[in-house]
Image (cartoon, rainbow, N blue to C red):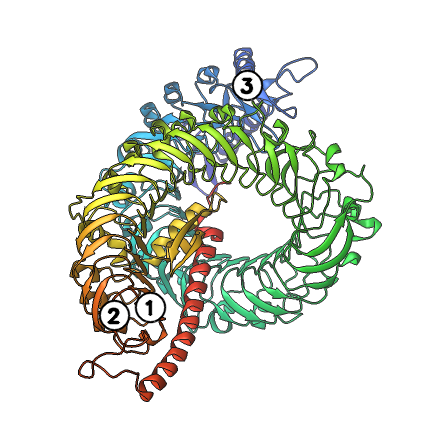
Amino acid sequence: RRLPMVCETRRSCRPAGLSMLVPSITTTIMGCLLLLLLLLVSTVDGVASASCLSSQASILLRIKEDLHLSNGRLSSWGGNGNESDCCLWEGVECDSHTGYIIGLELDATIDIDIAGSRIPPALFDLHLLQHLDLSGCDFNSSTIPSQLGQLTHLTHLNLSRAWVSGKVPYEISNLSNLVALDLSPLLGGLEIQEDLEGFVGNFKQLKYLHLNFVIFNLRNSQEWGANLASALPNLRSLSLVGCDLEGSLTPHIFMLPHLQALDLAYNELQGELMPSFFPSESKLQSLRLSQNNLSGHLPIEIFELPHLKVLDVEGNDLLRVSLPTKLPTSKLEILNLGGIELLGDLFRVWIVNLTSLVQLELSYTNLSGSLPFSIANLTDLTHLDLSQTRLSGCIDSLLFANLTRLTYLDLSKNTFSGLLPSLPHSIRIVNLNNNNFGGPIPNSYNLLNIEKLDLSSNSFVGPFPFSLFQGPSFAQSLLEDLDLSNNKFDGYLDLGIFTNFKKLRSLSLSRNNLTVGIDNPTLKFSRLQDLSLASCNINQFPRFLRHQMPMDGLDLSKNRITEEIPQWLNTFGYLNISHNMITGFVPGTVLNGDLVDLSYNMLNSLPNSLSFNYLQSFSIKNNSVTGEIPAFLCNLTELGVVDFSNNKFSGQIPTCIFNMSLANVHLQNNQLQGQIPEVTGKARDSLDILDLSDNMLEGHIPKSLGHCKWLVFINLGKNKLSGDFPSWLSKLPKLSILVLSSNFLSGAINFSFDKTAFQGLLMLDISTNQFSGKFPMSLLLSLNAMKTFDISHALWDVALLNDFGTKWEVAMTIKGETLSYQDENLFLMNTIDLSNNYFEGEILEEIGDLKWLQALRISNNKLKGSIPKNFGGLQQLESLDLSHNHLSGEIPEELSKLNFLEYLNLSYNNLAGRIPQSPQFSTFDHWSFEGNPSLCGPPLLLACEANESTTSIPFLVLKQANEERMWKNTSVALGFGVGFGTAISFSFFLNNGRGFDIFWR
């Protein structure tokens, strides 16, 4: 409608097409006025937008029919008394001239749900659609229809957080007008079958590409960056989070001239970030590379990028940051270096210059020393996370006073001590758990404004701080989560004081010295979902729970409850009432949750059936339950952990247990009979702990166990099993503990040496069976984990198993005593027990290759020959029992040099000669050597011949022995303390670390 113009001079401007020969100025002016009039008419005409076409409205109503809506969403679409013009309906955009629909926003949120069995087919009748937003919609994991490729006018397509799955139709690659594409699904499961470069090859105008958690192929895992940069030269934003990308990063992606945001977090990218990746002319504003395998030094050039506001490289454990002494002016607002090795003085010299910082995360780093006051210079800070570092000491009480915008503070898992620092009024979330804070809680911890307060596992002592929780104004409090557990608060506490907090959702008072009571049994919490009152001296089930909505979590463990479980007790999530004195029957209502722990009580029976099948973990160990294992277990399709140990269950093991997705099966110490069922189906891909010990099981060990590739722990001891040694278990890559003791297994162990067999085994116990034949040296030499022990590998297994919240143990005879080794300690005691069998032959010198062996027991066999001198290579050996065999010859001097050997039993053999005299051997009593008539010398009373040895230990040897024994005791204690502390810290790190934190919750 707008006419083109010809302007010859600044004073001569007229519409094209008029005579170029009219010299009259008047005519020229008239022409310009006519043009202005036409432009005005055109503008007025454009203001009157076209109304919605009836055909378009009909399509929208068909779309609405296919959707399930909540909270009044799309209520403006049609219906009585509603706006008839569909262009004014919620989420609808029309072309102002034609009335056709060009935009549709049906994005769902947490509060407003949009769902359907599929993406509505009527959508594809909106042929001129340019913008389509279905983000967050629940389409019941249906596939994306290929008809979406017919909407060729689309410039913006958003399916992020939508519940769709399956293959992405290739037809989408026909949408050549796309400027923005986001297919990031809610729960993964979306796959692009074609290679990514080919799929996006037509998107020449694409500026925004987000494919988080989408599975796709690459033409070349090393060149994907170059190929993608070549195909999409106009990219502004690229996000490929969790796409299993591999290989090294290349500069091509970083060199895209318009790139502003790059997110490649949660992949398997390797290599170094080079300075050349970050030219000074870069427009990059946001760079997220967290949770990859990057290494080397983080280039300082990153911090010199003129537009960079976000830098997140958390979780690249091999990456280091050399901090400069001086940093140029930076616009950084978000900085996350969590889990990175920091080199330099971070706070005092470097970070305080980043005055624009809004969010700072340095958790799991090597920060140490006190928290400097210079942090107070970061006045724009809203989010500060310094959790799990080496920071310590007292915190200046006014350190955070100037941080008037601070809303989030996490200093947990450090060793801070002294009084709590004061906090600004802006604070909303405070996490200070696992420190050594004590003293009074300051008034600045205002529970009117704080949403989450975690002071658990500190050193607070004395009366409970009632003043913080009393006052009429607390009805307006924002407090949602409160955790004061694992301190030493004492006195009586009425739970009713917390009912003033109307938004309170989670409350934990566990493991203090409190006596918690409920003075008003009819009290009610408006929103309480998680309640933890473990070790609170409670003697009955709190009656107010009868009137509460079922909660997500309830912990009443380690109290004094002696009642039966009431029918009204139930949760939707976690229930722990273990370690009480609860009696009677288990009602089905308490098994409505996800994780249920009823262990260590006096319960005697389970229900025959359940109405629900949500259980994921169920423990009723250490009770008095009788009868057969209930059939309802077979219907619990989500069950991952079952612990029925230490009860009185009888009958056979249901075959369904070994066809479920169970990870942990604990049925030990019952009265179960029959054979072990074959492992089939899902169990082969899930089972990692199997304990059937101390029952009356018979028959052979099923060969199908050899297909359970995740098995870490097998204990079948103390049964009536028969057959050969299960050599087929040797190919289980993760097997660490194998106990087959006290059965009727028999035959020779003809095991050929294989460096891949039992490669992770740390504990082997086949004692008290009927094995015979030659001493199985080839089997022992296959135990590679005892040659080069990797403690991190062992504790990794511990951490993964601990995720299920179960405990496991094995009783082993070590150092002359039957001891119970539990949890982490099982993986820290490398043990071989072949005792009480019928093995013959000699112990070969190669035994010395097992350099990490700590306990060896081969007693009560028929072994002959001499004790190998290579026992001297077992420098970690703490316990050695070769008693009750037919060993002969002298005791090798090399044994006397094993500095950590605490227990030695060579009794009842045919050994001869002088007992070696050394500081270590002087610690052993006579019973270690008795039953060898030809042995002589201390500690035996039989003196050696004069030409063999003197009859007593010289004074200097005794003196040296006493001195070295004192040194050894001290060093062993220190060594054990350091080693055990390291192990526990490592395990604690794995269990609580955010590296295992799933990126969706």
The tag earlier along the polypeptide, 3 or 1, is 3
Question: In the rendering, at what x and y percent does residue 870 appear?
Answer: 19, 66
Mark 3 neighbour density, 10 Å: few (under 14) some (14–19) many (20 or more): some
Q: Kindly identify the amino acid type of the residue bearing the numbered disc 3.
A: Leu
Mark 2 neighbour density, 10 Å: few (under 14) some (14–19) many (20 or more): many
Q: Is residue 546 left or right of residue 952?
A: right
Mark 1 neighbour density, 10 Å: few (under 14) some (14–19) many (20 or more): many
Pointer 1 with pointer 2, Cβ within 8 A: yes
Q: Nearer the viewer, residue 300 or 539?
A: 539
The tag earlier along the polypeptide, 2 or 3, is 3
Q: Secondary structure at mark 3?
A: loop
Q: Nearer the viewer, residue 905 or 50?
A: 905
Q: Secondary structure at mark 1?
A: loop
Q: Secondary structure at mark 2?
A: helix
Q: Furthest-right residue in view?
A: 472
Q: CA distance from mark 1 to mark 2?
A: 9 Å
Name the disc covering residue 67, or none.
3
Name the disc covering residue 901, or none.
1
Q: Residue at x 46, y 59 (%)?
A: 984
Q: Nearer the viewer, residue 190 or 157?
A: 190
Question: In the rendering, at what x and y percent does residue 340 appear?
Answer: 41, 60
Residue 205: quadrant of the picture: top left
Relative height, residue 471 to residue 415 (above, below): above
